[in-house]
Amino acid sequence: MQGIFNKLQGDRTIWFIVMMLSIFSLLAVYSSTGTLAFKQQGGDTEYYLFRHLFLLGGGLLLMYIAHRINFNYYSRIAQLMLYISVPLLLITLAFGTDIHDARRWLTVPIIDISFQTSDLAKLALIMYIARVLSRRQHIIEDFDQGFLPVIIPVLVVCVLIMPADLSSALLLFFTCMIVMFIGRVQLKHMGLAVWMGITVFMLVIAISSVTSYEGRLGTWKNRIANFMDDSEGDSYQVVQSKIAIANGGLVRLAPGKSVQRNFLPHPYSDFIYAIIIEEYGLFGGLMVMILYLWLLQRAIRIFVKSPGAFGALLAVGLAISLVIQAMMNMAVTVNLLPVTGLTLPLVSMGGTSLLFTSVSIGIILSVSRYIEQQEGDLPLAVASV
Amino acid sequence: MSIKRDILWRINLVYLLLALVGFTILLQVFRIQVFEGEHWREMGHNSTRIDTIEGRRGNIYSEDGRLMATSLPFYEVRMDVNTTGLTDSIFNNNVDSLSKNLANYFQDRTPEEYLQSLTEARASGERYLLIQRRVNYNGLKELKTWPIFNRGKYGGGLIYHQQNRRVNPFSLLARRTVGYARDNSQSVGLEGSFDEYLRGTQVPRSMHRVSGGTWVPIHDDFELEAKNGKDIYTTLDVNLQDVVENVLHRNVRKHLANHGSAIVMEVKTGKIKAIANLGMGTDSTYWEKYNYAIGEKTDPGSTFKAVSLTALLDDGLVTDTTIVDIEGGQKDYHEEVMKDDLWYPYNEITVAKAIEISSNVGISKLIVQHYGADPAKFIDKLNDMNLTQPTGIEIIGEPRPTIKTPDAEDWSGITLPWMSVGYELDITPLQLLTFFNAIANDGKMMRPYLVSEVRELNSVIERFDPQVVKQICKPETAITVKNILQGVIERGTAKKIASENFTIAGKTGTANIAKDRKRKKEYQASFAGFFPAENPIYSCIVVINKPSMGDYYGGSVAGPIFKEIAEKCYSTSTKTHQPLVNNGAKINGTLPISKRGYQSDMQMVYNNLGVSHAPNPDTDWVVASTKDRSIELHTLEMRDNLIPNVRGMGLRDAMYVLENRGMKVRFSGKGKVVGQSPGYGKRYRKGTVVDLELR
C-alpha cells in the first residue's frame, strides 16, 4: 500500500479521499445490487460487484493518466472538448438511446459503449470557463470582453442538456454561476445571467409543451408538484428513503444488512446515500460528507498554492462542481430537494459518469502535482496572479 | 486587494455555504432518525414486505401418463383506472362497452353495476381496482380483446397476477395417496413425500402497500424466474384404480363399514397399481379420508396364518401333509380358550387342511409345539421375513409393525399361540400384502413403490426401479404355500369366490379388533391373495373395518370384493390373457385399414397383433396397403417444398412430419387425421399453417 502511495504524485490526501470513497462505494453498491430486483432479473449479484470494481479500477487508471499530464495542456483540451461536445449533444438529442423516456445516452460506434454526453459536456464546460475566466481576469468586468465569452457557452450547453436532463442542466448552470462568482464576474452581470437562464428555461418549457417532445415534461411536473404539495404526503421513493435513514440510527455497523434496498428504486445510484446511512448510521453519512468537504478544502489549498490562475480556477471549479453534485444528491436523499436523477460522485454505481468524475479528479491532481514540482524547485515561491 | 485574495474570500464563502448545506443535510438525517424515527420505522414494517413467488407445481401422472394432479393457472385481474395512458375521452367512450363485456362474461354483476364501479373508481383516483379474483387462462385471453383492456397495461390499466390452483382431474381416485400439499399443516400422500420434486423454486418479491390495504409488487416489470416443479409418474393404473375404488365403494356401503381399503400390487415389481381407502364421514358418505392401507396397523387375524405356515415349512418343521389334531376346535392355553371360528367335524387333519378351514387350534398348536420352547426363534423368523420392518413406501407416516419379543414385559404365555393366528401384533394391510406378494413371487420380497419416474420437461431425471428387499424363504417353500393357499379358494373358507376364468390363491381373515375382545365384538374382515395362482401377476389385499350389517367373515365380506377386483383386473389387463393367436395363424376377417405412419411403430403394432406384413427397408415413413392376407408397406412420398400427405396418421406422427419441415400445425378433434388443409402436394413455405382435422 505504502509502495503504491509513493508512486502517486500530487496531493496524497486527495488520493486517500478517493480511496475512502471507493471503499464506501464498493460496500454500498455490493449491498444494494444484492436486492431482489436484481436477483429477479436473473442477475448474479457478483456480476455487478465485479463490473463496478472494474469501473472503479478503470477510473483510478484514468485518474492516474490524467494527473500525469501537465495541467497547462488542459486549457487547450478544454476548448477542443467543448467544440466536440456541442455537436455530440445535438446528436444525442436527435438519435440518442432512450432510457426511462429520457434521451441522454449516446452509443459510441465500434467500441459499443454508451455514455451520457452531458457528463462529457459538463467536464468540458467547467474546464472551458476556468480557461476563459483565467485568461480574462484583467478585463473580467467588461460586458463584451469579460462576461459574454463566459456566459454564451454556458447557456448553449445547458440548453442542449435541458430537454433530456433538466436537473443536470440546472445543476450545471448553478455550478457555472458559482464558478463565475469565484472568477470575479460582476454581480450585476451574474444577475443578468440568472435572468437569461430563467428566460431560456421558460422558453424550452414552452417549446416542449407545444411540440410532441414532451417525454420529460410530465416527469418534471410530477416531481416538483410532489415536492411542493404536502397534502398528499411524500412520494414513494421519499418515504422509502426516509425509512432507510430511520432504520440506520445514529451509529450502526451492518454491512449488507439493508432492508430498504429491496424497496427503494435505484438503491445503487440515486439513493445510495440512504443505503449508506441505513447500514452505517448517521456516523457513516457524516464520514461521507466530511470526505467531500475535505476534498474541496484540499482543492482550495491547491488554489492558494497555485502559481497560475488557470490551474487554480481549474482545480477549484472541478472540485466545486463535484461537491455541489454530491450535496444535491444527499439533499434529495433526505428530502430537502425534489427527486432528481443525480448520482453521488465516485460512490454511485454508474458506468461512464464515474469515469468522467475520475478524470476531473485526475486533473485536480495534475495541478497539485505541478505545484509540488514547483515547490521542489522553488520552495518559497509566492504566487501572485 | 490582489486579484488572488479577492478570489480567495469568494472561495471561502462558497466553501462555508457548502459546509452549511452539508450541516443542514446531516441535521435533516438526525431529525428523520430521532424525531420522526419511530414513525418511519413503523411505516417500514407496515408498508413493505417480501413475498415469495413459486414456480408452477409439477404434475402427478398415472403410469399411462394420465393427469392425476396438476396446477392450473388462474389470474387475479385488477385495473389501474387512472393510468396515464387512459385519457378521459378514451375512458368515457369505451367504459360502457367494457362494462357490458364484463357483465356478459362474468355474469356476476349487471353492466350498470360495472359501469358505476369503474366510473366511481376513476373519480376517486383508484389505481388498483379489483375486477375479478379468479379468471382462467381463456378468460384472460378474451378479456384482453375488450375495449380499454386491449390497450394493455399502461394504456388501458389492465393488471393481472398469475396464481396456481391444484386440480385433481380424477377427483376421488386415489385421492389420499395422491395427497394434498398444504401450507399450514402436514402435507399428505405423494404431494407430501415428493414435495421437494413437485414444488417449483421460490423467488422472493418485494411488495408494498398502497391505499386501501392492497399489496402491489414494487418492481412491476420483473421477469419471473421461478422454475416450475418436476413431474412425477406414479405406478398407479387409472383403470384399475377406478375399478378398485368403485368396487370398494359399493361394498363399504353395502356392509356399512367404518372404513375399507384395498391395494393391488404387481407381483414381479412391487408396483402399486391401485390403492383405495374409503372411510365413513360424519354424513355417512364415504370418501378418501385417510390412507388406512398404509397408515393403519391392526391385528390382521387369520390372514397371518399364512405367515406362520411359511415359517413352519421353511424351517422344515412340517410339510403340507403333516397331521395335526385340532381337538374338536377348542384348546386351552393357560387360562385362555382358543376356539376355531366354525366348527368342523374333524380331529386329525393335515396342515394344508388346517389352513383351508382356517383352524386357530391347528396352527397355534403347531407353532407352540415347534417354537414354544424358544419363542425368540419364531420372532427371528418373522424378522427374517422382514415382517418386523416397515415396507419403506414413499408415503409419509407408514408405521413400523408391532411385533412383541419374548423379553418384552407384555409377553405372556398366550402371546405365541395368539400371535400365530394373527393377534397380539399389529401390522398394516400394505405390510401384509408385501408378504403375500413375496410368496407369489417365489419368496422374493419386492419393495412396494408408487413412483416410477421423476421428469422435468418430459425428460426423465430420476427413475425408480423395482427393488428386491430380500429372499424371505426358499422358493420351494413359497410354492408349497401357494398351493395350500390355492386350496383355500378351492375347498376352504373362500370357496365362494372361485373364478371360472382363472385361479386365485389367498387367505381369509376375520379378526375381532375390539379393544376388549371378551365383551365386545368389532370385526375386521380381510382377504389377501394373488392371481392367477399358477403364474401370479397381481397380488391384492382387501380390508373391511367394522362391517355392521351382520356379516363379518373374511370369506364372505372381503373375499367377494377381492374376486370382483381380480375379475376386472384380469379382464382389463391384456397381459394376463392367454394369447388367442399363438402360432401366427392367418386371421380371418378384415385387416386394419391403410394408414400412414412411422414404420417401426407400425411394425410393432402388427407384430403384437400377429398380422403378417412385409417390412420396407428403404424408409422411415410408410404408407400401408392391405393385400389379401398381409400388409405391404410403401415409402411415403415426401418431396421438398410440397406438403406431404398425413391423412391416416395419428396427431403425433403428423405433427412430427409437418413441423420438422417448418410448417405449423393447428388441429381439431382427436383420433386420426381425416382432413388436411392446404391439401397434400401443395407448395409450402416455412411457417405455413396446416389445419388438420382429426376423427
Image (cartoon, coloured by chain):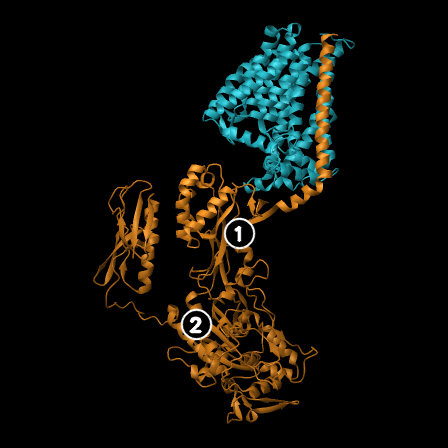
Chain colours: A cyan, B orange
Residue B631: % across, % down: 25, 59
Q: In this view, does A288 lie to the left or right of B490?
A: right
- First in sequence: mark 1 vs mark 2: 1
- Tell which residue pokes out farthest to the left in this image: B628
Secondary structure, mark 2, is helix
Identify the residue shown where x is 49% and y is 29%: A215
Residue A81 in view, yes or no: no
- Label 2: which residue? B246
Amino acid carrying mark 2 in the image: Asn
For mark 1, what is the residue? Answer: B200
Is B338 situated left or right of B499 in this image?
right
Can I make out residue B274 in this image? yes
Percent x, y for residue B322?
A: 53, 87
What amino acid is labelled 1 in the image?
Gly
Q: Nearer the viewer, residue B429 or A81?
A: A81
Q: B124 or A295, which lies in front? A: B124
Task: Please identify the quadrant where the C terminus of chain A is shown.
Answer: top right
Chain ID for label 1? B
Q: Are there few (<14), some (14-19), or many (20+) residues within 10 Å of tag 2?
A: some
Q: Quadrant of residue B2?
A: top right
Q: Label 2: chain?
A: B
The location of residue B129, given as percent across then percent down, is 50, 46
